[in-house]
Amino acid sequence: MTYQVTVQPSGRSFGVEPGEAILAAGIRAGIGLPYGCRDGACGSCKSKKISGTVVHGVHQAKALSAEEEAAGLVLTCCGVPHSDVVLESRQVVEAGAFPIKKLPVRVNTLERLSPDVMRIVLQLPANDGFQYRAGQYVDFLLRDGSRRSYSMATAPHTRAGQPDATPPVGAMMELHIRHMPGGKFTDHVFGAMKEKEILRAEGPFGSFFLREDSDKPLVLLASGTGFAPIKALIEQMQHKGITRPATLYWGGRRPQDFYLNDWVVQKTAEMPHLKYVPVASDALPEDHWTGRTGFVHAAVLQDIPNLSGHQVYACGAPIVVESAQRDYVKAGLPEEEFFADSFTSEADKHGA
């Protein structure tokens, strides 16, 4: 039988089919529940169960511990209702979500931004009308049925197509892909992939996007290619004339990991309210690095020891996101002002 899930405080509700996870049903219904990996690995979809019975599928303890589950917390990405359920979720988007589409995309250009980061510009089908929020991601659907998720590195307004051209030209979408040696998709990207190749994509996914109803100063925290959705947020802020004070902290091992450093520097010149702090954790003597060192999330606390008046957007490796959330809440950041997209690899998702 179909169960009803109601989300408070919005009061919105939707039906869930037998055996279906709450999040999948919510996405299908256009309800903007918070989530990240959709694989029980990151904990971004964690919600408070007010009433009802939810049985969890496979998930990691770091995403939902036994103690948290006993206290009534659920992961909507792998939680299946066994009765009508009432949840408390602070991030439901009243306007609803953009429709999720499956679409073919053509590789337009491949550009190596650093030894292990590739910029892929994809051409979308003409007249398709694919919509997304800056900060969201798409899945590539591989031939064996597996998926790989990557954030759009450009804001929606930058991707205009030319549907009236002959032949019609679809909108463009930029992704930043880091090579994971042995990875079935990234080995292909850095090896055999050619321009004009056709890929299958599905999206948009994710609840990582700028909350424009706040005027709080922003901390934009990125590690590695976690910069991609942050780049989209910065473009969105500039496009909409948002002048909230914002500081980008970008963490990498060595200076070469700041693969679009010149782009960021240019944006700080165009956007006086935007500051930039690159942080290299493992710079070598030959790098001649004179900037900040150490852990990128710690650099934020060195500069802003009291985060109670800020809003934080964190994106990148799970260890960075998790450390930031833990330490920033201790430094006064309200939990509801921390927004994250944890870049979980296949190894992360399977607890490796």
Image: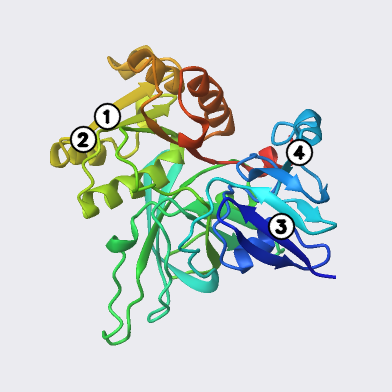
**Inter-mark Cα distance, 1 to 4:** 40 Å
Q: Earlier in the sequence, mark 3 or mark 1?
A: 3
**Inter-mark Cα distance, 3 to 4:** 15 Å
Of tags 2 and 3, which is closer to the observer? Answer: 3
Where residue 28 sits in the image (x, y, percent)?
A: 62, 68
**Inter-mark Cα distance, 3 to 1:** 39 Å
Residue 142 appears in the rendering: no
Above or below, 79 relative to 96: above
Do the residues under discs 2 and 3 have CB atoms within 8 angstroms?
no
Q: Earlier in the sequence, mark 3 or mark 4?
A: 3
Of tags 1 and 4, which is closer to the observer? Answer: 4
Res 276 label: 1
Of tags 3 and 1, which is closer to the observer? Answer: 3
Residue at 41% x, 47% y is: 229
In the image, what residue type sits under mark 4?
Answer: Gly
Answer left or right for 180 relative to 302. Answer: right
**Inter-mark Cα distance, 2 to 4:** 46 Å
Answer left or right for 125 relative to 102. Answer: left
Residue at 32% x, 78% y is: 169
Give the residue pinned by disc 2.
265
Q: Earlier in the sequence, mark 2 or mark 3?
A: 3
Residue at 35% x, 18% y is: 304
Quadrant containing the C terminus is top right
Answer left or right for 29 relative to 309. Answer: right
Residue 50, picture quadrant: top right
Of tags 2 and 4, which is closer to the observer? Answer: 4
Residue at 57% x, 50% y is: 9
Do the residues under discs 1 and 2 have CB atoms within 8 angstroms?
yes
Give the residue pinned by disc 4.
72
Q: Earlier in the sequence, mark 1 or mark 2?
A: 2
Above or below, 144 relative to 310: below
